[in-house]
């Protein structure tokens, strides 16, 4: 059922990440919902879907906001591709591998941002950046679990047996 609405999951993740969460007062660290949606789509539907929706979310984020378009699009696309490559192993491990994969993707995305800050010779507080990284990673993993579970259950609800469809 949800296979037809993959774009809606990516769009909802993007809207929540870049439109809703920044408007919440008093919240300085929030999960990367867009990355969680891209990783979940890649883990369920494979590398093609993960890379396509990662690139779409990255291009939207980079073009609508003051982010580097090429860096954002490339980062999200490559992380969606990596999650897609892990899709066959993720199906067998149910929850352990998807949690690890989403956490590592969040760390890699934050590391790309840190490297860009270092290359731009920007001043930043290392301790604050690291605490935000760990908090953001944990929140992203927690956010990715229901998205992945919903996609997993909708994708594998029906099993094809010969010409019959069984539940």
Image (cartoon, rainbow, N blue to C red):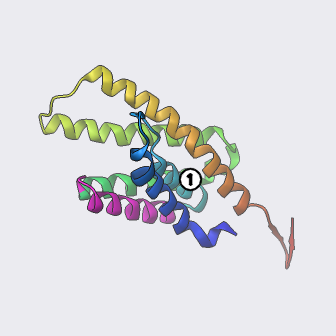
How far from the left and from the top, in percent, is residue 89? 62, 48
Q: Which residue is drawn at 54% across and 66% down?
A: 8
> 148 and 78: which one is in front?
148
Q: Residue at x 20, y 37 (%)?
A: 117
The quadrant holding residue 30 is: top left
Farthest front residue in view: 25
Q: Name the quarter where the C terminus is drawn.
A: bottom right
Residues drawn in magenta = 47-68
Farthest left residue in view: 121
Q: Residue at x 40, y 36 (%)?
A: 107
The main secondary structure of the magenta stretch is: helix
How far from the left and from the top, in percent, is residue 6? 56, 66
The relative height of residue 155 versus residue 118 in the rendered view (above or below) is below
On the rendered structure, is 46 left or right of 56? Answer: right
Residue 17 appears anywhere in the view: yes
> 64 and 151: which one is in front?
64
59 in magenta? yes
The relative height of residue 83 versus residue 136 in the rendered view (above or below) is below
Residue 82 appears anywhere in the view: no
Q: Is mark 1 on a helix, strand or loop?
A: helix
> Which residue corresponds to mark 1?
40
């Amino acid at each position: 059922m949800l296979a037809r609405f993959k774009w809606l999951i990516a769009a909802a993740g993007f809207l929540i990440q870049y439109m809703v969460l920044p408007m919440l007062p008093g919240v300085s660290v929030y999960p990367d919902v867009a990355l969680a949606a891209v990783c979940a789509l890649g883990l369920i539907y494979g590398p093609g879907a993960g890379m396509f929706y990662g690139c779409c979310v990255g291009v939207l984020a980079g073009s609508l906001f003051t982010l580097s378009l090429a860096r954002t699009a490339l980062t999200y696309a490559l992380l969606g591709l990596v999650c897609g490559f892990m899709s066959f192993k993720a199906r067998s491990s149910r929850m352990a591998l998807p949690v690890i994969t989403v956490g590592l993707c969040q760390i890699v995305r934050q590391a790309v941002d840190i490297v860009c800050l270092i290359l731009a010779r920007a001043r930043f507080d290392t301790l604050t950046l690291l605490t935000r990284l760990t908090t953001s990673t944990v929140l992203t993993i927690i956010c990715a679990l229901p998205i992945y579970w919903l996609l997993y259950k909708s994708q594998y609800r029906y099993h094809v047996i010969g010409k019959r469809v069984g539940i």
